[in-house]
Amino acid sequence: MRARLVVFPVKGRNWCFSRSIDPLSPETASSCNTPTTLKQLWHKLTSSEKHNSNNVELVVDFVSHKMNNAWIGLEKAPQGSMKNKIHGLGLKLLSGVKPSEMFLISISKEVSQVEVTYPSSLNARLVRRRLRHIAMRGTILHNKYLYGSVSLLPLTFVFSVLPLPNVPFFWILYRTYSHWRALQGSEKLLQLVSNDSHTQNFGFSNVKGSEAEHNNSERETSNLQGVPSILVPSGELEELIQSGGKTDDGLSKCAILNICTIYKLNPIDVLKYRNSM
């Protein structure tokens, strides 16, 4: 499966790394195979002849499914209720998660090729170097934070004896899952972009319109299914950055939202890059 990544500077040395949202991604279909009950989970664990790592994936996906359902339940809670207040607290906690972590989580195990779109004024080697840097840094940080989160789970579980919802435990549980996925994404991204000899560059700097540019990209890369990473300079993205204007906070919010709309990016995560260090 190919994932489209969009890379561009937002403020000084702060660059945005984001994956285009694809509602028809095969990851959606694979999520349908996730066990939803303990009985289904046990059946898959005992009937499959898979390796232990795949069994761990099943358990992680099962826990993730349960957490998603619980979060949806909090989101639908009546205004002013305890569940609604917990949901508001969760949103505040989630707002502190770094956008680079969300980007690495989006690089799932199903991704076998990345198409990197970047402004045509940037050097391809610099873009590839920055991608390798964020991947290498992610493997170090999230490996450390993963062990830290796991060590805190028993401590926060003690709060279950209280009559209130154990928010610290579930938050640490989510952070454990998040660091696990970010670590996997870091390793996958590093694998895809670390081999310089397999990275191709295509010049579309004179192409106008995102649809035409994307069609050219699809046509040129259709014969490169075995290439792990493809760097595609974009004239349109360069024009959006230059015409969008800059403020003291870097690239203007209006320009960022336009880029997010055209390239199908998550604006909440992209806007965080302006203030990240």
Image (tube, grey):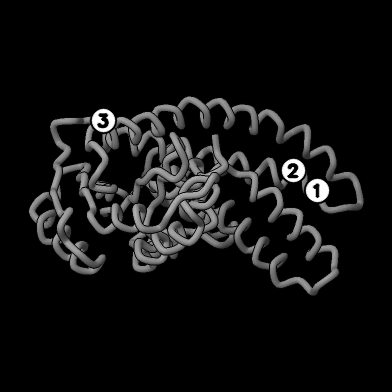
Where residue 207 appears, as percent x and y from the top left, is 16, 61
Q: Disc 1 and disc 2: Cα gap in Å?
A: 6 Å
**Tag 2's secondary structure?**
helix
Q: Earlier in the sequence, mark 3 or mark 1?
A: 1
Q: Residues within 10 Å of mark 2 (few under 14, many from 20)?
A: some
Q: Which residue is mark 2?
A: 169
Please provide percent x and percent y for residue 200: 14, 41
**Front position in the image: 259 or 77:** 259
* 46 vs 73, nearest the viewer: 73
Pointer 3: residues within 10 angstroms few (<14), some, or many (20+)? some
According to the picture, the residue beneath numbered tag 3 turns out to be 194
Q: Amino acid at mark 3?
A: Ser
- Mark 1 touching mark 2, by CB under 8 A? yes
70 vs 272: above or below: below
Determine whether, in the image, residue 63 is placed left or right of residue 202: right
Q: Residue at x 77, y 43 (%)?
A: 168
Position of 175 with respect to 21 (left or right) is right
In the rendered image, which residue does mark 1 sit on? 166
